[in-house]
Image: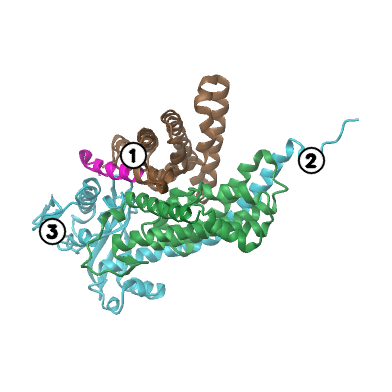
Chain colours: A cyan, B brown, C green
Amino acid sequence: MKEKISFRDSRLYPVFFMIILSAILTFILAFSYQLSKGRVQMYQELTLQTNLLDLYKGEIAELNNKLIKDYTPEEINKIYNKYITKRTLQNPVDHQYYEFSQNGIRSGYVFPVSAKGLWSTIKLLVAIDPDFSNYLGIKIISQGETPGLGARITEDWFQEQFTGKRFYLDNKFIKLQMIEESEDPETDQVSQITGATVSSKAVITAIQDELETLYKQNFSSGKVN
Amino acid sequence: MEINAIVIFFAAIFTSNILLTNFLGMCSFLSVSKEVESSFGLGVAVFFVMVCTTAINYAVYHLIMVPLDIVYLQYIIFIIVIAAFVQLTELFVERFSPVLYYTLGIFLPLITVNCAILGVSLFMIIRNYSFLQSIAYGGGAGLGWLLAILSLAGIRQKLKLNRVPAGLRGAGITLIITGIMALAFIGFSGIAAIQ
Amino acid sequence: MSRKEIFIKSAFTENAIWVQILGICSALAVTNQMKNSLVMGLGVIFTLALSMFTISMIRSLIPSRVRMMAQTFIIAFYVILVDLFLKAVLPDVSQELGPYVGLIITNCIIMGRAEAFAIKNSPLDSMIDGIGAGVGYTLVLLIISFIRELFGFGAIFGYQVLGSWWTRWSIMVMAPSAFFLLAMLIWIVEIRKRKKA
């Protein structure tokens, strides 16, 4: 009579074990994932709202009491709803953008722009005044460039240098000239980042190109919507 | 303005070397770099596995994980892919080329836990690369790792004849050399305005 | 060995980084700021403690053929939990740590401790060993990041300590400094060891 091998020692057991183990672990993970999904989405929405408001913080009285990060999500949401409206363009279809209004008067637009950096797609928001004549500011939302080099596009001086630069004047689009980081930018000039020309160029070029395209396709024939 | 895959390839070797800039693949790097021959063997094996698993993981991510919304399981799935691939490669090499197996085969189990391999797949996803860019990145990262470990082995070979302070022998001096190499590689950041 | 002895051993006398030279990858990557080091360290402690506990609990059930795979699976499971937690509760830290959280799985420390300890010891002892190894690891990370952040940014945990008169040492912000600092640390530990001997 053949000796019976215990189930433990059989060839089938490791397979059986792994299947059970995987099933249990994956089930718990799927459950945890569903739980956390809601929070993650809420956070992303909050971050977007905060970034949009940050671009106009000089003009929003309610934001001058404390640092923007000290406001509760409810407060941010309230201020956001008061000043910012989300809209979609016709061309490209469903492309989102935002309008900033004060007391019913449109005071600016914000467009999401993507730039192909060296390592990553750089996502940023570009704020421009309602007649597109001057930039109001830019905000880098996400990037994965080299720390210490390309990642320096997130430095305040780089982003703030766009404020006030001209974009569209006398039916002409201004091409910003890119100069060295060590030089002081004059009218219609912006500084690149030393050693990070790909990242900074990508951002500067993408801002101008995308805005020009969006303007030509949506705003040039008079007011949109 | 799509970043050229070739630029990514060269940047992965020099300006953003997976080991000297991103610190990945250190464990086996420190222990195997004592000998030039084994370093070369391990480096080539790492390169091969990196390119292949990057390609496979790209496909698995975009064709399976995203449609099924199981992206959060990516760590487990990528590791399984890597382990399975290494296992298959080992079987394949053992069967078809005993010579190759003798020189390279012993490194393969070491590679499964090499954080650089998993790291490259993860970075590829985070940076949203296309298939071509992913391959370029995987290949460049592998070559960069090979370059780093080969250089280190060469230096350590020379060091055998020098007097290293007792406290630094082994890990200490290896880390310092690696640090100096990392510094030197930063000098590459001027290459054709790569970054 | 008492619980206390297990802890001291895995945290200090056989410290994963400066004695066993394991787990260096993430050790160097996240040390640019103390906050990142702390979070990474806590993640590793959590993963280590629970993985060790779980693996030890089912050690008699794990077939030896799939031992490594099963261990990796369990470790990956806890790492994903850490990752989900960070994404939901500390999203900006999650962004900063990026893929390095996932790389905890390949962190040789965890696999090493599992093979060396959890397979042979009781769950509670294994958990203590895991916590000890994690604490030792976190300690090294915090030491290195303290120096890097202080000299590279003039800050500690994000608080500006050195004013604008301080010229930042950019090397501290970049990769090479981590290598040098770790080498220094190992050197100091080695010298102390030899003095005692």
**Would residue A33 be seen by someone viewing this image from the given angle?**
no
Label 2 CA crowd tier, 10 Å (few <14, some 14–19, many 20+): few
Do residues under tags 2 and 3 come within 8 Å of each other at their CB atoms?
A: no
SS for tag 2? helix
The N terminus of chain A sits in image quarter: top right
Label 1 amino acid?
Ala
Q: Residue B192 in magenta? A: yes
Chain letter of mark 2 equals A
In the image, taking residue A155 as reference, residue B122 lies left or right, namely: right
Give the camera-side residue of A40 and B39. B39
First to last magenta residue range: B178-195
**Structural distance between the alpha carbons of marks 3 and 1:** 37 Å
**Structural distance between the alpha carbons of marks 1 and 2:** 50 Å
Give the camera-side residue of A74 and A2. A2
Chain letter of mark 1 equals B
The residue to which callout 1 is attached is B12
Chain letter of mark 3 equals A
Residue C145 place in picture, x, y as percent = 38, 59
In the image, taking residue A22 as reference, residue C164 lies left or right, namely: left
In the image, taking residue B147 as reference, residue C55 lies left or right, namely: right
The residue to which callout 3 is attached is A166
**Would residue A207 be seen by someone viewing this image from the given angle?**
yes
Majority SS type along the magenta span: helix
Q: Which mark is residue A7?
A: 2
SS for tag 1? helix
SS for tag 3? loop
Q: Residue B133 in magenta? A: no
Label 2 amino acid?
Phe
